[in-house]
Amino acid sequence: MEELSSIGVVGAGTMGRGIAQVLAQKRYRVVLCDAVPSQLERALSTIKKNLNRDVEKDRINAAERDQALANIRVQASLEELKGSALVIEAVSEVFGVKQHVFAELDRLCEQTTILATNTSSISVTQLAGTTKRPDRLIGMHFMNPVPVMKLVEIIRGLQTSEETFLATRSFVEKLDKVPVVVNDSPGFVSNRVLMPMINEAIFCVYENVATPEAVDAVMKLGMNHPMGPLTLADLIGLDVCLNIMETLYADFSDPKYRPCPLLRKMVAAGHLGRKSGQGFYRYSP
Ligand code: CAA
C-alpha cells in the first residue's frame, strides 16, 4: 500500500478513530465509515483534539495537522470503500455484526482488496470463512490508545495467503508500528494473557479481597504496569472486556475463563468505564 492510497476504516469508535488518525498522519487517504452520524462527529472532534495537542507539544506543525485532517473523509455508507486497497474493520466485538460488515465489503470491494479485522478475540478463520476471499482476510489488531501504542498483532487465519500476510506486515511497518505475528486462536496472545488478568483483578474486588484502588496500586507499584488492571479495564471498556471473556470461555470451553459476575453486573448496569463516565472509577464528562 503506497502513501496516498485510499484505506477504508469501518467503525468510528475508540479503535476506528485511533486507526484513522494514525493512517492520516502517515499520509494515507482515509475513508472512515460509521452508520451512526454522531459517532463520526465524535471521531473527528477527538482526532482534532489529539492533533492539536501534538501541535502544542511541538510534535507536529500546524500544516501537518491540517494535512492529516484533510486526509480523512467520513461517510455513513460503505459504498465509498469500493476503490480501497485495504479496508480495516473496527466495529463492535460481536460476530454477527462483523459478519454483516464483511458480507457487504466482500460484495462491494475489488477482488484485490485486503480485508483486515481489528477484532480482539473473534476467530479470524471463522470471519474469513463467511467471505468469498478467505485468502485476503487477516487480523490487524491495534492496541488502545492507538496513536501511542507500538504493537499491532497480526493474526494469520488458516486460509490467509502469504501475499496478504506480507502486504499487511509491510503496511504496519510503514505506520511505524511493530507487527508481531501470531496464529489464529481465541484471544490470540494479547487478550489470552491480558483479559484473564483483568478478570482476576475484578474477582479480587468481587470477593472483597481489596478495593479497586488497592488492586491497581499493587500492580502499578509492584509490577511496574503503567496503569492498574481496573483502570485499564475502564479504558478498554467493560463491555469489550466482557465480550472477550465470553469468547475465551465459549471457544476454549474451560471454566478458567469464566467472566466474573461483577463484570457482568457492571455491564448490565451500563457502567462501561471511561466512555460511560462510570466504571471501577468515576470520570467527568
Ligand atoms: N490518544 C492519543 N494520545 C494519548 C492518549 C489517547 N487516547 N492517551 C494518552 N496519550 C498520550 C498523551 O498525550 C501523553 O503524551 P504527552 O505527555 O507526550 O503529551 C502520553 O500518551 C502519556 O499519557 P499520560 O501522561 O496522560 O499518561 P500515562 O503516562 O499514564 O500514559 C498510557 C498513558 C500510554 C495510556 C499508559 O498509561 C499505558 O501505556 N497504559 C497501558 C495501555 C495498554 O495496556 N493498552 C493496551 C490495552 S489492550 C488493547 O488495546 C487490546 C484489546 O484488544 C483490548
Image (tube, rainbow, N blue to C red):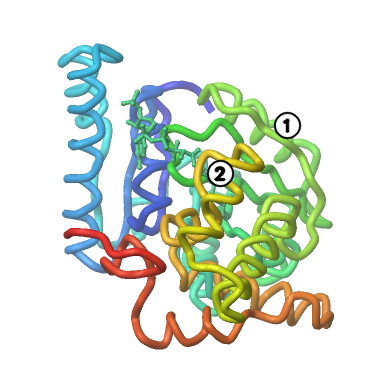
Where does residue 15 sit, x and y in percent of width and height? 42, 51
Image quarter where ligand 1 lies: top left
Taking depth in this image into account, of 270 and 69 the one nearest to the observer is 270
- Pick the quarter of the image with the N terminus: top right
Where does residue 172 sit, x and y in percent of width and height? 59, 30
> Which mark, residue 220?
2
Which residue is disc 1 drawn over?
A: 166
Taking depth in this image into account, of 196 and 91 the one nearest to the observer is 196
**Residue type, label 1:** Leu
Does residue 224 lie above or below 107 as drawn? above
Q: Residues within 10 Å of mark 2 (few under 14, many from 20)?
A: some
Q: Is residue 160 left or right of residue 213?
A: right
Q: Is residue 253 left or right of residue 24?
A: right
Q: Secondary structure at mark 1?
A: helix
CA separation in Å, label 2 and label 1: 37 Å
Taking depth in this image into account, of 97 and 152 the one nearest to the observer is 152
User: Quick one: label 2 or label 1, which is nearer the N terminus?
Assistant: 1
Q: Is residue 15 left or right of residue 262?
A: left
Q: Residues within 10 Å of mark 1 (few under 14, many from 20)?
A: few
Q: Secondary structure at mark 2?
A: helix
Residue positioned 61% across, 73% down in the render: 209
Residue positioned 56% across, 31% down in the render: 150
Does residue 39 lie above or below 259 as drawn? above
Between tags 2 and 1, which lies in front? 2
Where does residue 256 sit, x and y in percent of width and height? 80, 76
Where does residue 180 sit, x and y in percent of width and height? 72, 36
- Pick the quarter of the image with the C terminus: bottom left
Residue positioned 56% across, 80% down in the render: 206
**Residue type, label 2:** Lys
Residue positioned 61% across, 37% down in the render: 224
Based on the displayed image, in which of its 4 quarters is residue 161 positioned?
top right
